[in-house]
Amino acid sequence: MEKTSETTAEYRPFLEYSKEELAALLKSWGLPGYRVGQIRRWVFARKTDRFSEMSDLSKELRTKLAEAFVAPRQDGGNGEAAKKAASLPILIENGVEKTLSSAEIGGTVETGKVAETGKAAADGETSSVAAAPVGFDSVFEGRLVAKSVSDDGSEKLLIEWRDGARVECVLLRDDRGHRSACVSVQVGCAMKCAFCASGLGGFSRNLTKSEILEELLRLNALLPKEERLTHIVVMGTGEPTLNLDALLPALAEATASDGLDLGNRKVTISTVGIPAGIRRLAAENVPYKLAVSLHAPNDRIRDEIMPQNRIHPIAEVLSAADVFFKTTGRRVTFEYILLDGINAGLEHAAELARLLRNKTAIVNVIPYNPAPELPFKTPSTQTTRRFVDALEDAGIQVKIRFRKGDKINAACGQLRWSLRDR
């Protein structure tokens, strides 16, 4: 079905619609408001992205929804989008690549008609991930380019949007039953942290509300039907406080009782430390946890590994974090990636302890997840243990975030960068 220029101009992705906006749209079609709840139940609770599978809706309504949310093509009519749509995603299992068949991912590679949906993969329990992108019969806009699976339970998706931009999102599992979604908020990153692959290739644009929600829904659909996401960490590619206008509405949908139904305290926003953004979160009394990427105990080291520090040095960042704590009552987590030979010595631990003394805070120590494109090294287990012990001896509360997904390029930006020419 070709879009006219008029309908293209009016197009809005399904996931951009709030409940109220969707109700108004259905009302304009002469339909009752309770249909909104039915549609949202399918999308958020039953893990389907296909209008054709919403069996308690009339066939006429399912068709109308599919037609209303066909994404306009952005390839100038030369067929490039159709060629990409027909390509199958790559599966990477612990570093070994293969191309998934449409049957394995439960979708179809045909375009130009309503897609027939197959059943999911091997174990028959996980929800299907559609190969056909976008557009027809789906609430999703993105095309699945690659899926990485690690033996520690981590799964990473590389999604391509209609304009060709790509982002990553990760599902993390642990033995406590946590099922955490780590999502991106921007295509690329302008912060240029030296140890992070997110900024390789530069910054392109902010993600939209619907694109952030799609990340969450795709990750939730990787889980067996009896499971759902338990946590959201906004720690993927991009600086969250520079895209709050899209991020906060997406998180509001995710935490809603008729959304993904997560408690507000199960959501963490991680920032490189933009004081204005932190102060906005405080002023709006955002009900989520805040994590500040500190990664150095002094301005000299932080200037070298985090160029943003030259604009907003540590004192400004800590001042904004204090405002957040005093305003919301929620303590701040300070993220600290250990880089061997740079910031992981006992002298650095002592300096960090002095910096955070008398603050109601927690330090999240993260041994570096190496990227082949970058020169940094992970400290030894002994070095990590000494660093943590020194902080605890100084009265600082510490957690260690163990590396997950290092075999599947799960650090920020790694998968996107490794498949940039595909």
Image (cartoon, rainbow, N blue to C red):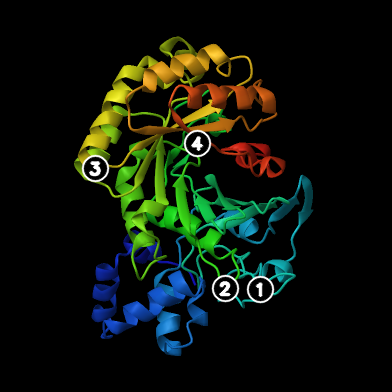
147, 132: nearer the viewer: 147
The answer to whether mark 4 and mark 2 are in CB contact below 8 A is no
**N-term-proximal mark, 4 vs 2:** 4
Query: In this picture, is 45 found above or below 326?
Result: below
Q: How far is the residue under mark 3 from the one under mark 2?
A: 35 Å
Q: Secondary structure at mark 1?
A: loop
Please tell me the numbered disc located at residue 188. 4
Sequence order check: which comes first, mark 1 or mark 2? 1
Q: In the image, which disc is placed on residue 225? A: 2
Q: Indicate which disc, 4 or 3, sits on the residue closer to the N terminus.
A: 4
Question: What is the three-letter code of the residue carrying label 2?
Answer: Lys
Q: Is the residue under label 2 in contact with that under label 1 (CB below 8 Å)?
A: yes
User: Where is 326 relative to 286, above or below?
Assistant: above
Residue at position x 57%, y 22% from top? 387
Q: Any mark on residue 328, and which?
A: 3
Of tags 3 and 1, which is closer to the observer?
Answer: 3
Circle 1 residue:
125
Q: CA distance from mark 1 to mark 4?
A: 33 Å
Q: Report whether residue 349 is seen.
A: yes
Callout 2: SS: loop
Mark 1 or mark 4, whichever is nearer to me: 1
Query: What amino acid does circle 3 point to?
Result: Thr
